[in-house]
Amino acid sequence: MATAGDRAVLQSIFNPSTPFGDIPGLDEEEEDTQEEGDGFAPELLAQARDLELQGVSAAESGDVSAALERFSEAIRLLPQRPSAYNNRAQALRLRGDLPGALRDLDASIRLSRGRGRAACQSFVQRGLIRRLQARDEEARQDFERAARLGSAFARRQLVLLNPYSALCNQMLCEMLERLRNPGGPGSP
């Protein structure tokens, strides 16, 4: 039977673009075991969730203005709930309002105390915005925090931000290709 270390080595050989030790399925992005609705009145929480679902539907259909309205209504209803800030940040980003998106992501992270699904999603989003702004060190910090919260996507982004890792992965891929095709192009 393969140990976790064995699986990590095999994973790095067959999928060199993943960070060492990143075993698919081992820790997929899980919901926080604590219900994110704890402490909110159930009827208000149900209304806020419904408004967020309406906002997501509006955004998916291309109506970003309606999405922003629904997310803002959810925030007015439960201003201490991080999820709506995270969702509104996505809509603001779609509209091109990066400063507004960053403010909402900061609020989501603060309200979630940097824990749980909303924080994980907010760290990933903020990391992506910071990459767009060429603020790679801050993006790396956000992706590291999201990765610690279980985001496989954030771990992949960390690999992309590491030039040494990318070079090693490229060399490993070339070596594996030569092993698979001994007489192919690039062989000595």
Image (cartoon, rainbow, N blue to C red):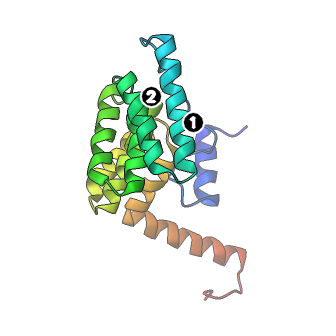
- Counting from the top left corner in percent of width and height, residue 101 is at 33, 47
User: What residue is disc 2 on?
Assistant: 116
Nearest the viewer among 75 and 128 is 75
User: Is 136 situated above or below 7?
Assistant: below
Residue 157 on image: x %, y %: 44, 55
Q: Which residue is mark 1?
A: 27
Residue type (three-letter) at the residue carrying disc 1: Asp
Whether residue 146 is visible: no
Q: Determine the CA span between mark 1 and mark 2.
A: 14 Å
Q: Residue at x 47, y 43 (%)?
A: 67
Q: Nearer the viewer, residue 169 or 122?
A: 122
The amino acid type found where label 2 is placed reads Gly
* 139 on left or right of 172: left
- Looking at the figure, which quarter contains the N terminus? top right
> 10 Å neighbourhood of mark 2: few (<14), some, or many (≥20)?
many
Rendered residue at 65%/75% (across/down):
177
Foreground: 34 or 28?
Answer: 34
Q: Is residue 26 above or below residue 132?
A: above
